[in-house]
Amino acid sequence: MHILKGVVWEDGTFHLLFTFGAFYYCNGRVTSKRILSFQIMIIRKMNYFFKALPFLYLVFFNLIQAKVDRPNILFVFTDDHAPHAIGAYNGWLKSVNPTPVIDKLARDGMLFVNSFCTNSICGPSRAVIQTGKHSHKNGFMNNGNTFDWNQQTFPKLLQKAGYQTAIYGKSHLKGKPLGYDDWAVLPGQGLYYNPDMIFPDGKKRVDGYCTDVVTDLAVEWLKEKRSDKQPFMLMVQHKAPHRNWMPALRHLSLYDDVKIPEPPTLFDEWKDNAPGARLQELEIDRHMDLNYDLFVDLTPEFNQPPSQLRQDRSAWHNMKRMSPEQLKVWRAHYAPRDEAFRKAKLSGKDLIRWKFQRYAKNYLRCVKGVDESVDRLQKELTRLGLDKNTIVIYSSDQGFYIGDHGWYDKRWMYEESLKMPLIVKWPGVIKPGSRETELVQNLDYAQTFLEIAGATQPKDMQGLSLVPLMKGERPEKWRSEIYYHYYEYPSVHMVPRHYGIRTKRHKLMHFYQFKNEWEMYDLNKDPDELSNLYGKKETMKLQNKLKQRLKNLQKSYEDESDMSVREDYIEEFRKKS
């Protein structure tokens, strides 16, 4: 219930106080003071209550709402977009100019340099954002889980605060989304071409390229379904650039005349890592399939067994849904290149380099579609006159290996998959070109959205609102470390369970099911994490200190999930190796 707050002093003058979200209005002036709820209280000498309350509400509510416009939020969220595949992050891929639009967003707003996930896997990262709670608290710890939509989520709280909410694209949490006024989501991972979409009234096939389809739905909502009487939260969640990296037809030849730079760790041999790094199943060399991952000779009629026991064949299945016209353009691009590859008869490092080039180009081609989507969405905001009062946020569920350490995929607590992009443009609030270096996580998103909306931040949420950082403030008590916990093992890619702590300089992680498998790094001296310091005499004091801080984090976040040693795993996955 919206209520005014006023005071009548002894001299008989009436002073109106009105709380609206993050603003405080008094006698015609608006200042930024966070107030948690609407309250009206009319106080006069000897507890005299003003009886004209309903009338005052009607008179002043529109006045105050006009003066204090809560911002809209456009949240563009992708899947597996590594920060080093964004030019603004100044990574080793910057020279190919992969994201000119997202780079401009960073110049117009704030780029978070030290942005991390809590669990580097698709569904769990999204569950953390929905709830503002770690995986062990929200119940969605790995991709095999089903999200409980009945629990508290930030979209539900935004609705209660008067926001209109919508989500389009990849949810990956199973079930029908709750907390949204309108929605259309991909089933599971979804497909790149002619995807099925689940709408409130059922599943429908939508012809086109997935990134374009999702953008179309978002633009349609902005033009036709959005209410002019409410601020909005619009979540545009793309499948791209998730495996199997199928680009739009218009981007197939992009980078054809470019040699993608190789990461410095492409031929890493993991000699100083714990055993799990050598026993994974995500190497470009041994595990990236030429046919199903890189499309060599792949057609709908292709009928050869995959090279891997747990092979993603979604690209092959997706080709069966392509129209004849789509398939013709697709094969016209890849067929001559496949023939040239066969004739070259590559092996060893030359074959790895070829696989890397095709993989990286397809990945970046998918990124190009996302970059175009961000451009189109912002242009629509401008056309509708919404750009000045809309916060635009770009992020992704986690980072990704684009040949780093010889890998693809994510899951590890190493930097390339631990980091996630976060770029925010807030006109009139964020100083353009800002680069924030405090440690932030996807754990913080829910509370950030709520503070932006002027809604109450529930005490059981575990993150921190990023609004003070966006305003250029220096909070006295900001976090000095982050906590990470990955749970999905044994499973696809065979990355062992592990938890860990990362400070601004150091990292410690424990592969606990295998008892004494630890890794520790000095990120200032060793940013590629090639020299494991764990167990070394000269760093023992630091090691013990980090272990204690890690225990404190687990206690603080109440992580009581099963962290027991698995002797059967040691027998099966270590002794026989």
Image: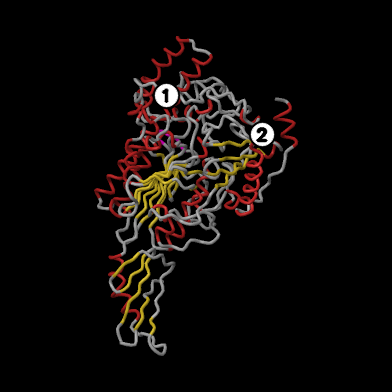
State the image quarter where residue 493 is shown.
top right
How far across and how far down the image is residue 231, in percent? 34, 58
- Seen at 48% across and 52% down, the residue is 444
Say whether residue 239 is magenta: no
- Seen at 46% across and 63% down, the residue is 456
Instruction: Give the residues drawn in magenta, as a range.
Output: 190-194
How far across and how far down the image is residue 570, in percent? 73, 33
**Within 10 Å of the Cα at label 1, are there few (<14), some (14-19), or many (20+) other Cα atoms?**
some
Looking at the picture, the colour scheme in use is: secondary structure
State the image quarter where residue 572 is shown.
top right
- Checking the image for residue 536, the label placed there is 2
Which corner quadrant holds the C terminus? top right
Of 390 and 15, which appears nearest the observer?
15
Q: Nearer the viewer, mark 2 or mark 1?
A: 2
How far across and how far down the image is residue 287, in percent? 56, 24
Q: Is residue 320 visible?
A: yes
- Checking the image for residue 261, the label placed there is 1
Of 445 and 172, which appears nearest the observer?
445
